[in-house]
């Protein structure tokens, strides 16, 4: 993207992106923690509540929403009183690759590993591994710097109404949990996406995301404090500030890319309005999560894990 992006085009593209629409449905830390828990074998309500320390009402609402999205399926295991176990569906299993990138970010940058696995083992090759994002076409590892990004708004996905959304208060004062909330928060991820696409100033971000100035101010402050963005005076206009990506926010890109691809393939069955292309092979970029040891695509049923103290 250029240093001076077409803000109206960017606004339309982000509004109709599969990323934005997916984050409206699962763009909060509790939903992703429930999914991460499901991938590590948690199935029962009380086990989710104990493992995640999530309020019971919130857990009930999130489980109901995931069932309605056909990502979890309840199965009765006790009749009196009725108790259900929640199993991942095919659509739920398909988000595993994006979930792996959340684990990878926490492994590389997190200060607290929470209840996440400390070590992953790929059963196919028998080795411990770190997941990597690769190009489906050429099978080579890819980072954000290896891509060009173009925009083509999707007329088949509805535009944002522009109406304010209820969003949780996010700060970084509560330690690891609030940092996880910040990384999984819809607005935070959309702000990082806007920065990836060339937005550097407060007014640019506010325009393309149609986010209220007070909310944007709070999110930017939290992102800067958490090290997900840096801020410095604009060299051309010292009255303005420039918000820049950091290594940790760049490391969120695999999660953003794989979540967007999952939403395109399994949720909306529509292409994203943000079109990456791999510079090396020249093909449209479709991201996949692969084993860093044998380079095979990773599937949830082919990965085992260890939970314990990190080495």
Image (cartoon, grey):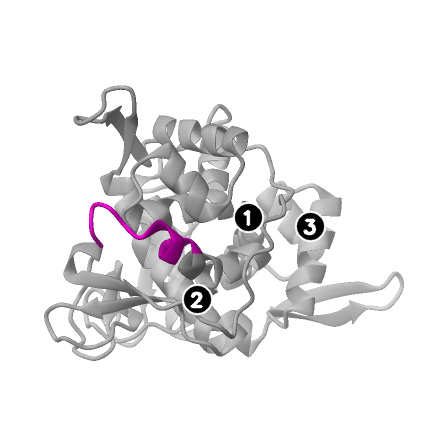
Tell me the quarter of the picture where residue 91 sits: bottom right
Q: Quadrant of the C terminus?
A: top left
Q: Is residue 81 magenta?
A: no
Tell me the quarter of the picture where residue 309 sits: top left
Classify mark 3: helix, strand or loop.
helix
**Image side of residue 278 versus residue 305, left or right:** left
- Tell me, for residue 96, which label it has, or none: 2
Decide: few, some or many residues near mark 1? Use Cα within 10 Å; few <14, some 14-19, many ≥20: many
Q: Which of 107 and 126 is in front in this view?
A: 107
Q: Distance between the residues labelled 2 and 3?
A: 20 Å
Residue 237 place in picture, x, y as percent: 22, 24
Decide: few, some or many residues near mark 3? Use Cα within 10 Å; few <14, some 14-19, many ≥20: many
User: Which is closer to the viewer, label 1 or label 3?
Assistant: 1
- Residue at image location 29% in from the left, 73% down from the top: 286
- Residue at image location 56% in from the left, 66% down from the top: 158
Vertical position of residue 304 compared to residue 198: above or below: below
Q: What stretch is highlighted in magenta?
A: 1-11
Q: How far apart are marks 1 and 2 (CA)?
A: 17 Å
Q: Which of 48 and 258 is in front in this view?
A: 258
Report whether residue 281 is seen: yes
Q: How far apart are marks 1 and 3 (CA)?
A: 12 Å
Q: Does the magenta stretch include residue 8?
A: yes
Residue 58 place in picture, x, y as percent: 70, 46
Residue 279 place in picture, x, y as percent: 13, 68
Q: Between disc 1 and disc 2, whose residue precedes?
A: 1
The residue wearing badge 1 is: 28
Decide: few, some or many residues near mark 2? Use Cα within 10 Å; few <14, some 14-19, many ≥20: many
**Image side of residue 235 versus residue 217, left or right:** left
Report whether residue 185 is seen: no
- Tell me, for residue 59, which label it has, or none: 3
- Residue at image location 15% in from the left, 71% down from the top: 140
**Image side of residue 300 versus residue 133, left or right:** right
């Amino acid at each position: 993207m250029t240093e001076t992006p077409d803000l109206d085009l960017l606004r339309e593209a982000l509004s109709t992106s599969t990323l934005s629409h997916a984050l409206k449905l699962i763009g909060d830390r509790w939903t992703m923690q429930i999914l991460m828990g499901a991938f590590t074998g948690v199935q029962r309500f009380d086990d989710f509540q104990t493992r995640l320390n999530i309020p019971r009402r919130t857990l009930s609402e999130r489980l109901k929403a995931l069932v309605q999205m056909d990502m979890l399926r309840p199965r009765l295991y006790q009749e009196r009183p009725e108790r259900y176990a929640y199993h991942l569906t095919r659509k739920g299993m398909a988000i595993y690759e994006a979930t792996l990138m959340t684990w990878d970010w926490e492994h590389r940058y997190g200060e607290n590993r929470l209840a996440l696995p400390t070590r992953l083992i790929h059963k196919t090759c028998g080795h411990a591994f770190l997941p990597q994002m690769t190009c489906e076409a050429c099978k080579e590892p890819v980072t954000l710097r290896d891509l060009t990004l173009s925009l083509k708004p999707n007329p088949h996905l509805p535009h944002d109404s522009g109406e304010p959304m209820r969003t949780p208060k996010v700060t970084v004062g509560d330690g690891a949990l609030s940092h996880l909330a910040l990384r999984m928060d819809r607005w935070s991820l959309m702000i990082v996406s806007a920065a990836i696409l060339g937005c550097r100033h407060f007014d640019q971000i506010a325009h393309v995301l149609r986010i209220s100035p007070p909310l944007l101010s709070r999110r930017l402050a939290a992102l800067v404090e958490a090290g997900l963005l840096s801020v410095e005076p604009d060299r051309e206009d010292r009255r303005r500030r420039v918000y820049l990506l950091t290594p940790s926010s760049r490391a969120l890109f695999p999660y953003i890319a794989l979540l967007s691809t999952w939403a395109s393939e399994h949720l909306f069955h529509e292409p994203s309005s943000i079109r990456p292309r791999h510079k090396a092979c020249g093909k449209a970029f479709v991201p996949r999560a692969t084993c860093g040891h044998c380079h095979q695509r990773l599937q949830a049923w082919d990965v085992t894990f260890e939970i314990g103290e990190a080495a």
